[in-house]
Image (cartoon, rainbow, N blue to C red):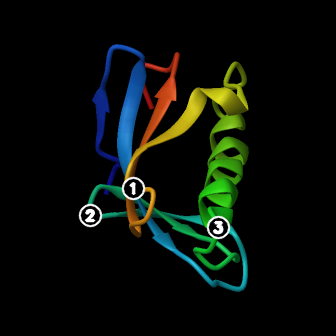
Amino acid sequence: MSLNYIKTTNGVSFNVRVIPRSSVSEVCGVIEGSLKVKLTPAPVDGKANKELLEVLYDYFSKTIPSIKKKDIKILKGMTSKTKTIEIAGVFEL
């Protein structure tokens, strides 16, 4: 299955399903059109969200060399396991 994404005025947005308190932080693949990401931190004080942005940067910077950390942000779902992510300056995934 492929990642469902939407073109926005700034770039692309897509949904991420987060699994906190995992043994390793990694992108696991695509499930039902959303990117599945395991994270080691518990969702306390924004630590899981910060780790999510780092993991996504590491993952996408391998295929999109022009991407910068500041280009990736959480649009919706700051306190939810399902989040909407935007990558600015990228128009195809």
Q: Quadrant of the C terminus?
A: top left
Q: Which residue is mark 2?
A: 32
Element carrying mark 2: loop
Q: Is residue 34 above or below residue 93?
A: below
Question: Which amino acid type corresponds to the residue marked 1 in the rendered image?
Answer: Lys
Question: Which amino acid type corresponds to the residue marked 3 in the rendered image?
Answer: Asp
Q: Which residue is mark 3?
A: 45
- Looking at the image, is mark 3 or mark 2 earlier in the sequence? 2
Q: Is residue 71 left or right of residue 74?
A: right
Residue at screen point 39% across, 67% down = 80
Residue at the outermost front position? 45
In whole angstroms, how far apart are the C-alphas of marks 3 and 2? 29 Å
Q: Position of residue 29 (x, y in %)?
A: 48, 63
Q: Is residue 8 left or right of residue 85?
A: left
* Quadrant of res 66: top right
Closer to viewer: mark 1 or mark 3: 3
Residue at screen point 69% across, 70% down = 25
Q: Is residue 18 left or right of residue 2?
A: right
- Looking at the image, is mark 1 or mark 3 earlier in the sequence? 3
Q: Is residue 3 above or below residue 21?
A: above
Contact, mark 1 vs mark 3 (Cβ under 8 Å): no
Question: Which amino acid type corresponds to the residue marked 2 in the rendered image?
Answer: Glu
Q: Is residue 10 above or below residue 28?
A: above
* Quadrant of res 22: bottom right
Q: Position of residue 12 (x, y in %)?
A: 39, 28
- Looking at the image, is mark 1 or mark 2 earlier in the sequence? 2
Residue 83: numbered disc: 1
Element carrying mark 1: strand
Residue at screen point 63% across, 49% down = 53
